[in-house]
Image (cartoon, coloured by chain):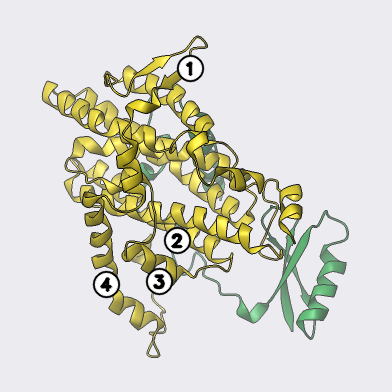
Chain colours: A yellow, B green
Amino acid sequence: MDIETVKERAGPREFSPGDDLPEEYRKAATRMIEFHANSEIMGAYLERPFIRQAPSIDRKLAFSAKVQDEIGHGQLLYRAAETLGIKTREEMLDDLAEGRGKFLNCFHYPMDGWVETPMIAFFVDGAAMRRQATLRRTSWEPYAHAMDKVCFEEGFHVKHGEDILRTLMNGSRAEQRRTQEAFEEWWPRIIQFFGPTDDKSTHHDFAADVGLKQMTNDELRQAFLDMYVPKARKYGLEIPEYPRVSQNDEGRWVVEEDDLDWDEFFTVAKNNYEPGLGQINGRARAQEAVEWVRDVIEGDGAPAGGRSPQAAD
Amino acid sequence: MIWEVFRQEKKGDYHTHCGNVHAPDREMAKQFAAIQHGRRKPTNSIWVVPKDEVGEIDTDDVPFGGTTDKAYRWTTAYNLQTEQAREVEESDSEQQEAEKQRGEA
């Protein structure tokens, strides 16, 4: 199939592994899905310490289940990417460990306290879910199928995240104040989740033309702000002065894009942001630490299995 | 030799199991599957898989979903009484449907 035919046919779930697709399409889809898969994994690693720090047994169980889900989403997505025939899962995981694999800006920043958890589990997951819902109509069928399962599960993450925020904002004065501080720190990064405005986006046109991407950064950011700014305010969070956010005549929320630090954004995007390297290297060490498990499973002396997967239930 | 047959109704749908056929090899299996399973119901694509290649575990082997209460994993456990984004509501109703089906099973 040539690229013109791809553009003509491009529609929801149009292309499957049986189709002979041009390299340009397969590369663009790989870049997009690999980024998404890497983000699931890096997000899970960022949140993992909070399983231990959870303030109650209910939170611990739910947080543990959520982190497990995110790792599972990463696995689904690496499969959807691998099927394009450009990179193997091993190559993608090694690239991530060695600092070449790219992932979401928010997951480059360290998290220090429990009050930060709803910034990821509510706002970032809410933003991610907005985007993922549109990707159920992507043209690469295995990606759309992965999104069906991801979106099914993700509602729990977002509602659980909102529940954490609600609890914190109904807690002590000190808790409310620390949650507000965390919000001020994370808010600009959360807005940058959807990347720069469309005129500055490098990959959008092609990805949209071949049906991989279903909505522009601007449309997604708009839908997110309209839903989540009122939610933040409802729980008593004050929207920071900068970046300036205001309601236009139609009641929609708009951001002054120039108020955001795009130098930092692009430094982060290139994996050159110093604290982010700590996240990358931390996961690389985890990958190295369990290498013996992969060797045992994939080596000649592989165990025959036979135990029911109790621990995974 | 038995081949399990998976039919996809429309482009983009899932291939779902719909039966099996006798066939000496993969080519014949595809032809028989197309005739038996692809004629009456709308069909976009069919997969055939040798029965011996299919692995199975069932409820005798493993308690699917675990043996303890995991209500915390479901959207329905979080009663926020706030307006939810459309995509969160969709997830919510899909989960409610799954919960209902599990209850019926």
Q: Residue beneath label 1, please?
A: A252
Secondary structure of the residue carrying numbered label 3: loop
Work out whether mark 1 precedes mark 4 in sequence or the reverse, and give the earlier one.
1
Secondary structure of the residue carrying numbered label 1: loop
Work out whether mark 2 precedes mark 4 in sequence or the reverse, and give the earlier one.
2
Q: Residue beneath label 4, please?
A: A288
For residue A216, the mark is none
Q: Amino acid at mark 4?
A: Glu
Residues beneath discs 2 and 3 located on the same chain = yes
Secondary structure of the residue carrying numbered label 2: helix
Disc 4/disc 3 C-alpha distance (Å): 27 Å
Work out whether mark 2 precedes mark 1 in sequence or the reverse, and give the earlier one.
2
Callout in the foreground (1, 3): 1
Picture quadrant of residue A260: top left
For residue A308, the mark is 3
Q: Is residue B84 above or below residue A145?
A: above
Q: Residue beneath label 2, please?
A: A75
